[in-house]
Amino acid sequence: MTERGQILKGFHPTPHDGPPVEWAVSDDLVPYEDALAEMDERVAGIADGTLAERIWLLEHPPLYTAGTSAKGADLLTPDRFPVHKTGRGGQYTYHGPGQRVVYVMLDLKRRTPDVRAFVATLEDWLISALWEHHVRGERREDRVGVWVRRPEKGHDREDKIAAIGIRMRKWVSFHGMALNVDPQLDHFAGIVPCGVTAHGVTSLVDLGLPVTLADVDLTLKRTFEELFGSTVAVEAPDFATRFSV
């Protein structure tokens, strides 16, 4: 068995016999409020059967988000970047250029209506994608997300390379994941990321890998299809025209 097989041992693919999932990639930075509005509309359409499931890849301008479990004391520099309260699970996190945000809008009624299994599947997706870049990502039972061991930085040192925070509405998921490709890691210093103080934050480039967002997008798409089924490329929302006043 390969190392990748060992990472995914015991995982059971989520069944899905519906149409392909739409796959959209935004090339420009997407304002956070616009992304929320777009997700709200998409989730409502998926729930009532008028819109297709969608994976949406994008970058945000620098900002902090506060999940439903966020603690005020974990916002260390509140004036550094805009802070957005959000309905996703989790605590504080950072979004910014160089980080691949993946909004996951899937109908769990058409798959497996089990939130815990769904989050585990998202972790498996990230772990599988990271392995294609020769990075061993690992899950932890006591904290959500994907972690990388850093023995060169000290005994038992682990850094977080990807965060997961989802919300469900009528069994349709939204929000999703954030994978650090090449963000400014010092931007994380304004918060206690996800409430964890004992570990650091890393990225693919910080680990010495000369990869781009486009490189990561290809592996995310390939590994997504292995777990969730086929996709079809669609145009990302055009906020310059859609949200103009």
Image: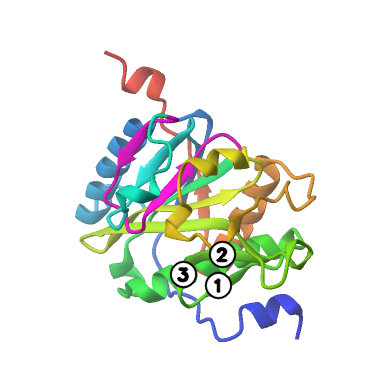
- Placement of 166 over or under 15, stated as above or below: above
Residue to which mark 1 is pinned: 139
Expressed as whole percent of the image width and height from the top left, the position of residue 2 reads 76, 80
- How many other residues sit within 10 Å of disc 2, few (<14), some (14-19) or many (≥20)? many
User: At label 2, which amino acid type do we have?
Assistant: Val
Main SS, magenta region, reads loop
Chain-order first, disc 2 or disc 1: 1
Expressed as whole percent of the image width and height from the top left, the position of residue 187 reads 55, 38
Q: CA distance from mark 2 to mark 1?
A: 5 Å
Which residue corresponds to the image point at 43% horizontal and 36% vertical from the top-left? 77
Element marked by disc 3: strand
- The mark found on residue 146 in the picture is 2
- How many other residues sit within 10 Å of disc 1, few (<14), some (14-19) or many (≥20)? some
Residue 93 in magenta stretch: yes
- How many other residues sit within 10 Å of disc 3, few (<14), some (14-19) or many (≥20)? few
Element marked by disc 2: strand
Marks 2 and 1 close (CB-CB < 8 Å)? yes
Residue to which mark 3 is pinned: 143
Expressed as whole percent of the image width and height from the top left, the position of residue 236 reads 46, 34
Element marked by disc 1: strand
Magenta stretch: give its range.
80-98
User: At label 3, which amino acid type do we have?
Assistant: Arg
**The N terminus lies in which quarter of the figure?**
bottom right
Residue 74 left/right relative to 199: left
User: At label 1, which amino acid type do we have?
Assistant: Arg
Q: CA distance from mark 3 to mark 2?
A: 9 Å
**The C terminus lies in which quarter of the figure?**
top left
Residue 20 visible in the displayed image: no
Residue 220 left/right relative to 153: left
- Placement of 129 over or under 179, stated as above or below: below
Expressed as whole percent of the image width and height from the top left, the position of residue 97 reads 57, 34
